Image (cartoon, helix red, strand yellow):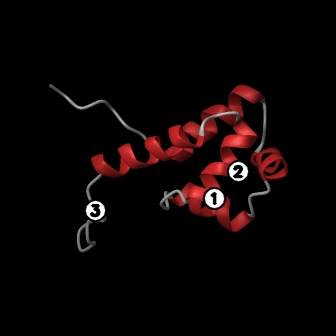
Amino acid sequence: MMPAETFPLWSFIEDELQARGWTVADLQGYSGLTDAQVAALRRGSRLELRTAEVLSRALGVNSATLLSLDMAHRRNIRPAKGEKESR
């Protein structure tokens, strides 16, 4: 059985923004996320609980869903050569 396809959390967020006709600035206005927090999400940094909570309120998506998407993708990616695998 093949595992389900996963994708970076930012891809999900971009889809949500597009569906709402929002820009990243709109998301920041509704959520209070800083430029640095958005940049971290875009880079694929691990989703922190507090960030998941503010995103969930802004997007109307359960924070557990956001955390699960992030965790599932992390399980399916391999670390770059020379990096340690995080678990």
Looking at the rendered image, the quarter that the C terminus falls into is bottom left
Looking at the rendered image, the quarter that the N terminus falls into is top left
Q: CA distance from mark 2 to mark 1?
A: 6 Å
Q: Residues within 10 Å of mark 3 (few under 14, many from 20)?
A: few
Question: Where 22 sits versus 84, above or below?
Answer: above
Mark before the other along the chain sequence, 3 or 1: 1
Front-lying residue, 21 or 62 = 62
> Label 2: which residue?
54
Q: Report the residue at 74% width, 58% height from top.
A: 33
Q: Residues within 10 Å of mark 1 (few under 14, many from 20)?
A: few
Q: Are marks 2 and 1 in contact (CB under 8 Å)?
A: yes
> Label 3: which residue?
79
> Label 1: which residue?
50
Question: Where 79 sits versus 76, above or below?
Answer: below
User: Type of residue at label 2?
Assistant: Val
Q: Secondary structure at mark 2?
A: helix
Q: Are marks 3 and 1 in contact (CB under 8 Å)?
A: no
Q: Report the residue at 69% width, 31% height from top.
A: 18
The image quadrant that residue 20 belongs to is top right
